[in-house]
Image: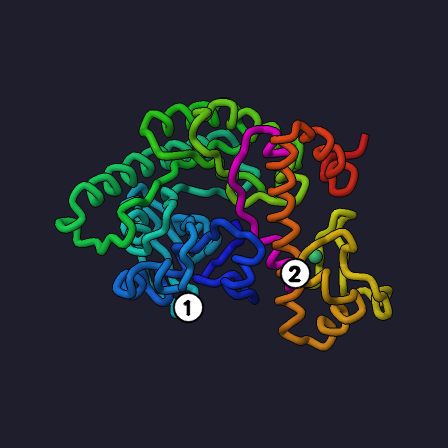
Amino acid sequence: MPVGTRGAVKSVTHRDLVDLGAEIILGNTYHLYLRPGDGLIARAGGLHRFMGWDRPILTDSGGYQIFSLADRRRISDDGAEFRSHLDGSLHMLTPESAAEIQLQLGSDIAMVLDECIATPADQDITRMAMERSIRWARRARARWRQILEDPGASGVLVTNTGQAQFGIIQGGTHPALRTESAQATIEIGFEAYAIGGLSVGEPPNVMYEVVAQTAAQLPDLAPRYLMGSGLPDDLVECVALGVDLFDCVLPTRNARNGQLLTRHGPLSIKNAQYAEDPLPPDPECGCYTCRHFSRAYLRHLYVAGEMTAATLNTVHNLYFYLDTMKRIREAITFGSFEQLRLEFRQTFSRRPQH
Ligand SMILES: [Zn+2]
């Protein structure tokens, strides 16, 4: 899922996203709630209509952004009290209100509010956050069901009655806590499940172990979503471990910083070595950028600070990610997945070299 934090995937149009084959994008509850407001978006007919995107949207719960506010937030059993990064105003996000906001936005997939913690965290702190996340998940599910059973009585302007709600498995890097979290969250019962609290600085081997252990406990027929992870080799490795859905700001953010991801590893387009290089960023890539432009031209745009640099780099990086997922699906179908996995390990590996 390309990340469209504030109702837009930075620097590209929806037309680009459709051309790239993006089937679903991610929107951000925290940002949309603060500006322009979920009420305004609901009155405009919901996020799909407001932003002119008719394919699926997943919204996060806003929790991750609030926990990143550090000294501007206070967490209690009720929820998370925080000050807006825009104007300092005081707000309260609860498991119930996070569900309400997402029903007003009308996303196709809503996430429950969970407690994210700074890592590495010891077992006691991780346990407390994990247990609170389960209590919050129960409340979020109850409120969400209650609203959808009788939208008229809820005071919430529901703009998508077909919304699904995903639970989130927490528990840090502690296998016993992951197991407890998975069992309790599955018992509450959601349309599907996400693995949260990873890609926060832990070594890749640790992340893969936690994903393997957690994914193995999730129901076979429900999609599994690994939140916020997505180096190219992580996609391949984590699909092997049973993950279906990913989101990551890396392809779009790195594009704006001049880093292009290719089959042969990352390429920093700002480097002087590309000043007169007539090749496209990746000669094997079929994206619009690689079909039309040279490294020399892209480097020039980047160095000159042209806005088009961000657009063309983003088109390439998103193509690379979406094409990687397509290649994974095809490799699974044709029985050549292990070969693809090996290929990625050789070009992108974050695993320690043995
Ligand atoms: Zn390309």
Q: Name which residue type carries label 1.
A: Leu
Secondary structure at numbered mark 1 = loop
- Whether residue 207 is visible here, answered yes or no, is no
Q: Name which residue type carries label 2.
A: Ala
Q: Where is mark 1, residue-wise?
A: 86
Stretch in magenta: 237-257
Q: Position of residue 223 (x, y in %)?
A: 46, 34
Q: Earlier in the sequence, mark 2 or mark 1?
A: 1
Q: Position of residue 140 (x, y in %)?
A: 29, 40
Mark 2: few, some, or many residues within 10 Å (few <14, many ≥20)?
many
Q: In this rendering, which labeled residue sits more in front, label 2 or label 1?
A: 2
Direction from residue 336 to residue 238 in the image, left or right: left
Q: Where is mark 2, residue-wise?
A: 255
C-alpha span from label 2 to label 1: 26 Å
Does the magenta portion include 35?
no
Does the magenta portion include 240?
yes
From the viewer's side, name the closer residue of 137 and 281: 281
Q: Position of residue 181 (x, y in %)?
A: 42, 28
Direction from residue 349 to residue 329 in the image, left or right: left
Asked if marks 2 and 1 touch (Cβ < 8 Å), the reply is no
Q: Residue at x 73, y 31 (%)?
A: 339
Q: Is residue 307 above or below residue 99?
A: below
Q: Position of residue 338 (x, y in %)?
A: 70, 28
